[in-house]
Image (tube, rainbow, N blue to C red):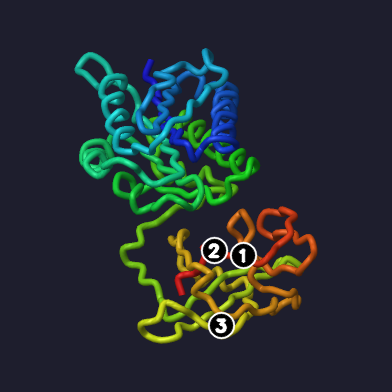
Amino acid sequence: MRRLPIYLVIDCSESMVGKPIKCVEEGITTIIRTLKQSPYALETTVLSVIAFAGKTKKLLSMAELYRLSSVHLPVGGGTSLGNALEFLMKDIDQCVKKNTYEEKGDWRPIVFIFTDGTPTDRYQEAAKKWREKYSESVLCVAVSIGNNVDTKILREFTDNVYILENTDPSSFEQFFDWISQSINSSSKSVSQTTENDINRSNSSNVVKKVHGDDSVVVDDNYIVILSKCQTTGNYYLIKYQKNSKDSSDYTLEGAYPVDDDYFELSAEGYHNLKINTDHLFGHPTCPICGNDSAIGICSCGGVLCVKNNQVNVCPHCGKHSFFGIANVGININRTIG
């Protein structure tokens, strides 16, 4: 029987301790439970789980789904992505059956790599080796958990890079539902699975694909922030102009409501552009509802208008919060300009 090898390569560094690692464990359980309900997946899929921190460890090796229920993830110090890639390549060479004259080997493996931080080792050689020797024979999907990962690093070894921007339990649940759907879809058409099949499974858009940005030029003469009115749910732009050619500071020009056609004309493929609020001078009120401040930064990363000394509801994630004045600068999402 030809198998469909699925690899989950999971960053278990110290920054994942607590809720993130628990959410990932629960997510793997969800994947196993969901795939067990699919006769296609149950017949063809085998699961390998590799954990990496400063070192790399295999937790599951080509395990058949009916034997599985859950996986415990350890935590360690460091984020040795290069070591994990080397370990993965060696494991694929040893465990995935190759085609021979006598029989066909396994189907094209699918690898999901999850990480929430910057590599702490010299990963470049392993990334180059993967790109040169494995990128055609293995479908690799890399996911940045949160916005702390430099996605350019992930794009050094795969073009299939996604960002899970919100790391609340609900977003993790939707994220692993996407993984489950992707694997299930692949098990039904194992001979034809492509990157587009993986992307189409992302119906909830809980993860955003990162496109190549070699051709993207960011306009640094202005800083423009996309914000959302918590009263109406409508969007508006906050525009700052650079103080001088050699300055890194910007002064408020204004705040302006935008219609839905803003998104029809906006470029795609940038998701990690930031500006520190220490460089922004001037804070407008909401141009839509008149709330006290047009710039409130929710823990989900969304920007919204806020009322002082009151409970505010984030229109992006629905969280209820009080907002105060930060004593230090905060990195805030900006547009491409």
Residue 179: % across, % down: 51, 36
- What amino acid is at disc 3? Leu
Residue 197 seen in this snapshot: no
Point out the image quarter for the N terminus: top left
Distance between the alpha carbons at the discs numbered 2 and 1: 8 Å
Residue 67: % across, % down: 52, 13
User: Measuring 50% from the left and 67% from the top, which residue is drawn there?
Assistant: 276
Distance between the alpha carbons at the discs numbered 2 and 3: 17 Å
Of labels 1 and 3, earlier in sequence is: 3
User: Measuring 53% from the left and 35% from the top, which residue is drawn there?
Assistant: 17
Q: Which mark is residue 326?
A: 1
> Residue at the right extreme?
310
Would you name the residue on which mark 3 appears?
252
Q: Nearer the viewer, residue 275 or 315?
A: 275
Residue 75: % across, % down: 47, 29
Q: Give the label, 2 or 3, closer to the camera.
A: 2
